[in-house]
Every structure is written in C-alpha cells, then in structure tokens.
Amino acid sequence: MGNFDFVTAAWPGISDEARRAEHYAFGEPRSSVFYARRTLELAVHWLYQADDSLSLPYSNDLSSLLFEPTFKTLVGPGIHAKMNVIRMRGNDAVHRAGAMTDAQSLPVVRELFHVLIWLATRYAATPELRPAPGVPFDAASIPRPQPGAAARTREQLQKLAEGNAAKDAQLAKASEDNDNLAAELAELRAAIAAITAANTVIPDTHDYRENETRHLFIDLLLSEAGWPLTEDRDREFPVTGMPAAKSDTPGKGFVDYVLWGDDGLPLGVVEAKRTTRDPKVGQEQARLYADALEQQFGQRPVIFYTNGYEHHIWDDTMYPPRQVAGFFTRDQLALLVQRRTAKHPLVASGKAPGTTINTDIVGRHYQVQAVTKIAESFEAGHERKALLVMATGSGKTRTVIALTDVLMRANWAKRVLFLADRIALVNQAAGAFKEHLPDPAPVNLLTDRDTDGRVFVSTYGTMMGLIDQGGSTGDDAGGGLRRFGPGYFDLIIIDEAHRSVYQKYGEIFSYFDSLLVGLTATPKDEVDHNTYSLFNLEDGVPTDSYELGQAIADKYLVPPVARPIALGFMNRGIRYADLSADERDQWDMLDWDDGLVPDAIDAAAVNKWLFNADTVDKVLEVLMRDGRRVSGGDRLGKTIVFAKNNAHAEFIADRFNANYPEFAGQFARVVTYKTEYVQNLIGSFSKTDGSPQIAISVDMLDTGIDVPDVVNLVFFKPVYSKTKYWQMIGRGTRLRPDLYGPGADKKDFMIFDVCGNIEFFNAEMTDAAASQVEPLHQRSFKARIGLLRALDCLASPHESQMALRLSLATRLHDTVAGMNHGNFLVRKHLRQAEHFADASAWNTPTVEELDAAAEHLSGLPSSVHALDTDEDAKRFDLLALRGQLGVVSLEPEDVDAFARARVRLQAIAEALGEQRNIPVIKQNLELIQAVASDEWWDGVTVGMLELMRLRLRALVRLVDKTKQAIVYTDFEDTLGEFEPAEVRIVTPGVDRERFREKLLAFLREHQEQVVLHKLRMGRQLTALDLAELERILTETGGFSPAEIAAGATEANGLGLFIRSVAGMDRGAASEALDSFVGGVTFSANQLAFVKLIIDQLTQRGAVATGLLYEAPFTDYAPHGPDELFTNAQVTNLIDVLRHVAATAAAS
C-alpha cells in the first residue's frame, strides 16, 4: 500500500507521477522532488480545466498559475504554501547543483500528500473515492532503494523537464484544435461544480500539519542562502549545559538548526518558534544554545531566531539584535565570525593605533575629519548608520571612497554598494572609484550585471530589480540561490540622500543588513521620514558636516558675486497699451492660440510660451559685457545658462547666433537630454580650450556637472526649491588655479539673476513642505478598508450597502491573493499577506486586523494592479470611495472629504457633458448631467455612487483639454538700473523663517474659497481672481505685500506661486493629462511615467519640461520622454504641462 493509492482511481495520470515521487524519496531525492513538482503541475492544470471559478493568468508556467488570485482563493493559504514549497524545491532539483538528501525529498513528498488529500476531498466524484478521514502520511511504507541503483543526474532531469514541457504544449495545441473541446469542458465543469457543492458540505477534518510547512519554508530560506541541510548534524543538534528549565532533560537540549563552517565549527545557530509566537521568545533560548556550542567547539556562532515570518540576527559580541530579511551565506557568516578577531581598529585609542586614512584620496582636513567621525560612530558608538552633509564641490564622493578604503583595509567591509538616483551620477561615481581606488575595480550594475566584485555602483531602481533575480520567485530562477542576499553588502552609500529615498526605496535598506552612509549637500526638514530619521539622527545634527560658508572661508571653494538683471517684461508682463504703434501692429498680427487677441500677457508666460527677442538680447548683452572673461579678457569665461524649458533654450541659442554670427554657432550650444551626443558636448565644454563656451541647459547641468572653469551662471528661470538653488550655485564654486594666467587663480564667479531668485532666497524663504505622496493603488486600498470598516459599523445596513461591502471585500481579497510571497517586498509582511489571502479573513475582521492590513499590505505589489491600467479610472474610483465613505461615516474628516470629492466629481461630470458628441458619453449623458447637478447629491446613497463609479470610470479619460501655442515676439524690453546684490550664504536645509509653512497652513484652512478652489482644480484664473487672491492673503491671512511679491516673483506669477505651495488637486492633475492618454494604449512604463507627472503636479502645481529628463522620470526612461513616446506625443505632453501652468495666470 502506498501513500497515494487514494488518487489512482480518479486521477491515474496524477497518481503515476505521485507514485514516482514516493518511490524515489529514499533512493533518488532529486528525482523524487522533480516528480513531486511534476505531479503538482498536472494537478494544477487539471484544476484550471475542471473548476470554472478559476481565471487563467497571463502565462501558463507553474508560478503564474499558482499565484493567480482566483487560484489562491480557491486553495486557501495553507494548501497554497504547500504547493509553493513543492514548486521551489522542484526548481532546485532541476536547476541547482549540489547534493540533495532524503531529508529534503521526504518533506516534499509529505507536502504533496497533503495537497492531493485536499484535491480528493474536494473533487472526488463519490464517497468511496474520498480519502479516509484522518488518514496520516506513512513514511515507513515508502520503499527503500535497491543497492547499486543509479540516480538520475540534474542534467537528465532537466532534459526530462524540457520533454514534459514540449509534451504539455503539444497536448494543449491538440486540445485547442479539438472542435468538441468547449462542449466537453462545459460538461466536465458542470459535473465538477455539482461534486464540489456536495463535498464542501462535508467537514474536512484532515490535519494538514501547517506548522511543518512553515519549518519547510525556513528550510527554503536557508537554502536560498546556500545551506542545503543535508547532514544529520544540521538539525536537532544535541547540546549539553542547558538549564533544566529550558529542556526536558536537565543539562541537554536540541538546536533547531546549526550552520556549520567548512572547518566543522559552528558559524550560526537558528532557533525556530511557532508562527503564532513572537520570534523574540526564542532569543534567550538561542543565546543559551550559542553558549553551549561555544563551550563545546570553542567558537561562538552568530545567533538567528525566527518564526518563519520574522527573522532576527544577533551578533552579541558587537551589536544588539536587529531584524533582517533572511539568512546569511556560509562565507558571510564566516566573515562575521572572523571579524571578531581579525578586524582592525578604525580610530586610534590608547590600546591600539587606528587604520590610517589614505591622504592620496583625501587630503583636506574636513574630509579626514568626516571619515574619522563616521569611523568613530561605527566603532565606539556601535552605530550602523551615518549621514554626511557637505557643500557641493567639497568632495563628498572622494570622502566616501576614502572611508571605503579604510573599512576594507580594516576588514570591516568586503563588498560596498554605491547608490544614486540618476545614471549620470552612477557613472560619475564609477569613474571616481576607478581613479582613487582602482583595486578593486568597481562594477557598474547599469551595464554589467553579472561580474563579481567588491565595489558596485547602481541606481536605486536597478538595484530593486536585481534583488529578486536569482531568487525563488519564478520557475527559471536558477534554483533559488539569491545572488544579492540580505548579507551580501557590508556598506551601502546613498548619494543625494534627501531625494525622497526613504519613501521610494526604503525597502532596499531594510532588506540589506549593512552599514549605511548617506551623502547630501542639502538635508531637508520633513515631517515624516526625513533625512535625519532615516539615519536615526536628531534633526539638524548629522554625523558630520562641512557647509558652504565654511568652505569658502577656508578657501576650498570660491564665493558667488551677484548681478541682478531687472527686466520690465520679466517682472510685470507685456501690456498692449504699453507698446509702440509698430509693436501693436505686430501684436495684432501674431498667431494667438485661440484666435483672440489678448490685452496683456502675464509675466509667468514670458519664456514659458511667449519668447521675446529683445528680452533675451538684453540679457546676452549684460552677460557678454559684464561677465568674467579669460584669455587676457578676450573671451567670455565658461558659462552655464539655466533656461526655463527646451524651447526657451533653443530661442536663447538662436538669439546669440543672430547677435554674434562671427562665432559660427560654436560659442553657445544647447545642452539638454534632447541634444544628440550630449555627453560628448559636455566633455568638450568641460575642457578649458573646448567648445562651447556657453552651455544653455534645461535642468541637465543643474547638478552632477563638475567644470572648474565655470565663472558665469545665468539664472534665466525662477527656482522653486532651495535644494535646487544651492545645487545650481554649486556649479560655479570649484577652485581653478591659473584660470586667468600664471598665478591668477579663480577668485569668484558671477551669477546673473534674471528672475529674482537671489532676492527671494536671501529673504530665507523656504521650500514648500515636501509631502510624501502614496501611490494611487495604496491610497485606494486604504480607502476601501476605511469604507469596509464604516459599513461594518452600521447597525442595520441596507441591501445596497451589503452588496457594496461584498464588492469591497472581494476586491481587497483579490489584491492580497495576487501578491507573490517570493517577492522580497512581500516577504517582510508575509504573516499579514497569508492571513488576508484567505477570503474568510474579510468576513468579520476586527478593527485591529483592518489596521494591520492597511499598514502592512496597502503598498505591496500585486498582480491585480497590472490588470487595471487606466489611471484616470482608478483616480475616479478613489473619489467615489471617498464620497461613499462620507455618506456612511459621521467622522468630521470623512464629511469634509465627501464635500471635496463631490466638487471634483461634479467638475468631472461637467467636463464630460461638454463632450456629448462622443457616442459612449452620449449613451450615459443622463447620468452625467445628473451627477453634475446639485439635486442628484441631495440624499445621495452609496448605491447611487457605486452605479456612478461603474458607469463613468472608463469615460474620465475622454475629458478634453486645450493647448497653448508658442508665440515669438520682438518688442523692446526695458533694462532696469543695476543694483548690487549679495548672495547670502546660509546653511542648506535650515529654515529660519517658515513663510511657506505658514502659507500652506492658511491655504488648508481656506481651501473652499472660490479662487483657491479654482487654483487647486486647475481652472483658468482671471485678473479679478488674482486681485481677490491677493486680497485674501493680505486681509485674511495677514501676509505682507513684500512676502506676496517675493513669492510671485519666484514663481513668475502669484497664481503659480500659490499653486506651488498648495499643489494641485490630484483629480484635477489627472484630468489635465486626459487629453494625452485618451484613446491611446500605453505600456506599463509609459503609464508609470504619466503617473509620475501627476504625482509632481499634485505636489508642485506645475512641472517644468526639464524635470521630465531627471529622476524619478529617468527610472522609467533614462533619456527622457523621447525614449518612451513619439515626437508628436512628447510635443502634446509638453503642451499639456504648459497649459496647466498657464491656468494659474490671468486669462
């Protein structure tokens, strides 16, 4: 009698493979696991054929079939975990080298037994075919191998797997060609539906031994780290010296897992507790086991304790316990143990000299001090994180290269990872490591993902993708051994650490267990997860700092000299009444976008879509006359012009060439991401004798460019960010010996400020508070949970409310069921993911359980997200959800959210109503007009809102938008008198007067004001609106005219300034992109790019074209939108963004 006899009558094909898995369990463990996986594959394919509740996923490989949401719902989390374990072990059998043992195959066969018990219990056609209640798995009945039998090799099994795949494909093709297939399947499914209906009435009393599955999952995590656990001593290893209270036999105990070194000494000890217990319960027991092993072998192992969901490491000779994402490899543990005695002191003390700092890498006192401060923090303070604040141009990268050198020579670090958010910064870091620390050679993961090394450089996005590669999440995962496991890196360096790193990429730092060093010139004070909190530091107190003012005083950087350029059109705009008669004729002849000739153009439009030749000519005149000159004064020094957008940059270049044709178009060149061979052009610009002499840039040269010859900067655009402002200034601060001749060094550099930036930042105006915008799918998940909770609180829910609750629970469950438990982001929250993958968990959840779901699961990836790619529809869903919550909840914040949602939903309906000529809108016009009216909202119900959501969600993208054409003029501008100004050097990131915070608080309190509502909703303002806005700010808000004027100057208009602080309504920002996405099928990357634009509009109120060529957009398109979209689409996109900004100016 075999363990799988109960399967034979109903599923003979499945039974044959299961018998093979059982037969080889003790003789050929690799073959046994292979056939167990094959059995599972056949069973899963049968389920998809027979059960009409299942939906086929995008791919028919086993991993995709297992993780399809309807499948996970059907089998439940317990059986699904068993299936996944079989799949992963089967992958090991085919793809992974190394011996396999009975200790690995037998548990897999046992798990297969439980899976088929479930299958037969649910689908057996007659009671006789159901397995007997309580039937146990009997390992003793499995035959033992005959002596001399030859085991199959991994290569043979791989060929066998390929043959099976080909055979399955042929059968699938034959089935498709069978004309009778549909009828046969329908008949089968009808019969199966009747059978399962009858079987599910009978209680399933089988003990599926789920705790054994959890132990097997720990085995797999250890396997990922290279621990095969093939020897008897690996598990339940006996030790002595345990306290009597801690073991059944006084003085004895059994260690769950011992991880052995090549020398036979223990490197690690793992204490596993039940999944229902806190893993910390095992901490003391693990320590006692470590004591016993140390006493027995003379080497103290590193301690791990886990419950299968959460894992902790405790190297109690150096650090307190900390949570980790998984287990370390043999080499990594050996290195930890070795470092206890082999690593050298970092800092000199009375006991021993420290590790010397290589002054060939860093020779300046503050750089040496920074390395020393971080070393002290790591060594004496036992800290694992450090933040270094250094002014742009003071050598941050060289400083951390010197730190890397120290840590490597002191045996504190073997592998180092340098992360940045832009490709250019990664390449720059790679070059710096090659120059200053050539051995070991750095590995650039952007271009070389397979080479091993000790120093790696990468973008955050690339690293996120590489973590799961080589893992066990897919069928071709290479056998489950992760290359970049949690213990792979000893040091991670974050460049420009303030750039929303924690929000977007914090999972990288919680996954890798390493020392962490952040670099920044401008730390930001943010309410949540700011730069300092990421590094466990007090706000404003980094590990070490070296600020711009001190660097200038120490003569390591040169100071700026300000030269404001006051232009009439840039300050007040262009009024028809102020023009000459000839200019009025030209004005009347211009090709205005809407055919209507305006009376005036707001200052915000100048250099955005209206380009005036004389305005640019006057700026160039001042630059060429007053700019710092080289070559004995014969030639303008290297200059960077910061333009507002690409069209502006091209216009500046055209005007320069028109005014200075003698330079043959070589002296001033446009340098943007649209420029072909731009890196060659930048390289030539960087050379003293190279061309061009003037680089006209749109954001590209604001950061990351190091040209010491630069002596002139032209700020030809308003700057909205203090961080950006100081980075732009940093382009000119580098030293340059002998620039003006032998012994005539660079002493300063000029800033020609056309837009009032210096005046604004000298007043210490602060950036708008940086908001951490959650992804749309995360906010929607939380909104559904909030609505479900509110519905559960109703004493007597109506039928429509109960139907809505069922729909919410189904959607939430499908989302969780679509989460891949092998993904490193999901693993951290595996307990909650497994719990809520069970549909019954959503029936009567407690408030605490719903809070846990919102906290742990809302932001995780799910296959459900890929099924609904209509961003506009999902934003509409969110509005409807907030409206529904306001109907059933009495909480003040929910009532307020309802009022805001109503306004936005009515606005969307109004916009849709204007497109009644579109057939699908015409079909729903009655509902659209009703939603736009006030009467429909009187007594509105959740059912009415749900009907509205379902019928209109797909139409939102059809809302029409207008364009703003570019206009070129040549009116005489006025150049004001030169008034000297000084660039006030303040500490970046320190806000002494929080004007913007005060303004933001005021705007939030008065957001229902009509003009403020129009601003946030992106509706066109009039001159009367702007006058009313100024009145509200002065009379109600108490803001001074000077403050308002400074803000308006900064943003080229009061409307744009207020919107830059308050942001745009997300729904309005979404609507603004409707004309771009409407009627076009975009890829996932294209949609993600559009979503990022909406995120930026929501935060900033406007998006400059140049920002599209920077991170985070370059994470999806390294060379900007041109890489993702056609030229026509890019032009359309830019027009849309310009129109959004123009709505904040007077029409």
Image (cartoon, rainbow, N blue to C red):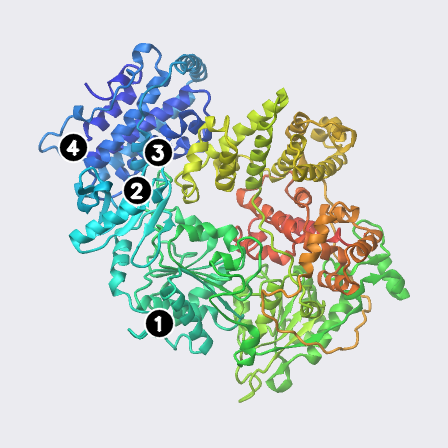
Q: Nearer the viewer, residue 896 or 435?
A: 896
Q: Residue shown at 34%/22% (left/top)? A: 118
Residue 942 higher or lower than 616, as above or below: above
Mark identifier at residue 479: 2
Amino acid under label 2?
Gly
Give residue 1081's quadrant in the image.
top right
Residue situated furthest left in the rendering: 147
Q: Which mark is residue 347?
A: 1
Going from the N terminus, do you reach mark 2 or mark 4 first?
4
Position of the N terminus, as image quadrant, is top left
The image shows a total of numbered marks equal to 4
Label 4 crowd (10 A; few <14 / some 14-19 / many >=20): many
Q: Could you tell which of marks 3 and 2 lies nearer the N-terminus? A: 3
Badge 2 crowding class, 10 Å Cα cut-off, few under 14, some 14 to 19, many 20 or more, is many
Dot in front, 3 or 1 = 1
Amino acid identity at mark 1: Val
How far separated are the C-alphas under marks 2 and 4? 21 Å
Residue 159 is marked as none
Kind of residue at disc 4 = Gly
> Whole-percent x and y of residue 1067?
67, 42
Circle 3 residues within 10 Å: few <14, some 14–19, many ≥20: many
Residue labelled with disc 3: 84
Residue that label 4 marks: 27
**Which three-letter amino acid code belongs to the residue tagged 3?**
Asn
* Label 1 vs 2, first from the N-terminus: 1
Asked if the residues shown at circle 1 and circle 2 are in contact, with their CB atoms under 8 angstroms apart, the answer is no
One can see residue 373 in this view:
yes
Q: Is residue 102 left or right of residue 608?
A: left
Q: CA distance from mark 3 to mark 2?
A: 14 Å
Q: Position of residue 469 (x, y in %)?
A: 38, 47
